Image: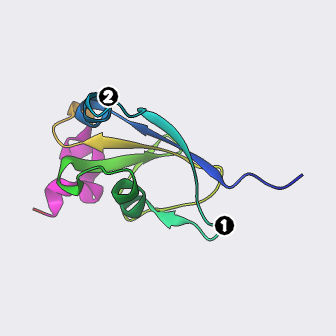
């Protein structure tokens, strides 16, 4: 049986609302290469505006959008303005450090 190349992607907060308003699912399974794909590229492929993303949860841990995601991983995009995306939480990972 071939190994799954899928990841699970969720959108939180206003990104969740944006997807719903567009009639798109807020949780998706998508294929990534076995070598992985950066989270910012995944966001682009899903049509998520980069300026609205503060960071990601990568396998339940806070991380940045430059994180490489591999088959079997789970990520969730966290929008700017979410209380959990405070600099004390995402630190150098969050978009607030790139403005």
- Please indicate, yes or no, whether residue 89 appears anywhere in the rendered image: yes
Q: Compared with residue 99, is residue 23 higher up or lower down, i.e. above or below?
A: above
Q: Quadrant of residue 24?
A: top left
Q: How is the image coloured?
A: rainbow
Residue 39 in the image: x percent, y percent?
42, 58
- What residue would you read off at disc 1? 34
- Please indicate, yes or no, whether residue 65 appears anywhere in the rendered image: no
- What residue would you read off at disc 2? 20
How packed mark 1 is, by other alpha carbons closer than 10 Å (few <14, some 14-19, many 20 or more), is some
Instruction: Point out which mark residue 22 bears.
Output: none
Mark closer to the observer (1, 2): 2
Instruction: From the viewer's side, name the closer residue of 4 and 66.
Output: 4
**Which residue is pictured at 58% across the width and 60% down the height?**
32
Q: Which portion, as a residue range, is magenta?
A: 85-98
| Local SS, label 2 | helix
Q: Residue furthest bottom?
A: 35
Left or right of 86 on screen, residue 59: right
């Amino acid at each position: 049986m071939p190994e799954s190349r899928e990841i699970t992607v969720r959108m939180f907060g206003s990104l969740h609302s944006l997807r719903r308003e567009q009639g798109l699912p807020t949780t998706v399974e998508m294929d990534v290469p076995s070598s992985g794909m950066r989270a910012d590229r995944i966001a682009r492929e899903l049509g998520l505006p980069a300026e609205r993303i503060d960071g990601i949860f990568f396998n339940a841990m806070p991380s940045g959008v430059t994180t490489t995601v591999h088959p079997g991983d789970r990520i969730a995009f966290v929008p700017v303005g979410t209380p959990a995306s405070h600099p004390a939480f995402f630190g150098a990972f969050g978009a607030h450090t790139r403005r």
